[in-house]
Image: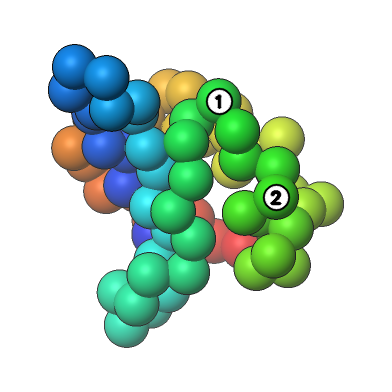
Amino acid sequence: MYVIKVKGVAKIPDYVQLRDEKFTLLAYFRVDRPDRSLEKVGLGDKTEYIMQKIKDLPFGQILKLDI
């Protein structure tokens, strides 16, 4: 699974994209509101781990997560 952190501009907030091995979009959510989106894709129990990785990730970079 891959994580991409996207910087928002003006009134658009920062977003996170979760993508699978084929780079298909699994989830797209605001950095400050991950709960429902992660639960929908079955990662509700990994929210804390994913958000810690996102917090340290610079905008525009791709990070591979082994989940």
Does 14 sit left or right of 20 as displayed?
A: left
Residue 23: image location, x then y, percent:
30, 74
Residue at 65% across, 54% down: 38
Quadrant of res 18 = bottom left
Q: Please, what is the three-letter code of the amino acid marked with disc 1?
A: Asp
Badge 1, how many Cα within 10 Å: few under 14, some, many 20+?
Answer: few
Circle 1 SS class: loop
Q: Please, what is the three-letter code of the amino acid marked with disc 2?
A: Arg
Q: Quadrant of the C terminus?
A: bottom right
Circle 2 SS class: helix
Query: Is residue 58 shown to the viewer in this render?
Result: no
Which residue was labeled with disc 2? 36
Confirm or deny contact between disc 1 and disc 2 (CB under 8 A): no
Residue 16: image location, x then y, percent:
40, 43
Instruction: Residue at the far front: name it.
Output: 11
Query: Is residue 55 shown to the viewer in this render?
Result: yes
Residue at 35% across, 26% down: 13
Residue 17: image location, x then y, percent:
38, 52
Instruction: Residue at the far top: name it.
Output: 10
Q: Which label sits on residue 55? A: none
Residue at 19% across, 17% down: 10
Instruction: Residue at the far bottom: name it.
Output: 22
Does 20 sit left or right of 60 as displayed?
A: right
Does 44 sit left or right of 4 as displayed?
A: right
Q: In this view, does 35 lie above or below 31?
A: below
**In the depicted view, which residue is nearer to us: 10 or 60?**
10
Residue 62: image location, x then y, percent:
27, 48
Q: Which label sits on residue 32? A: 1
Residue at 37% across, 37% down: 15
Q: In this view, does 23 lie above or below 62?
A: below
Does 40 sit left or right of 32 as displayed?
A: right
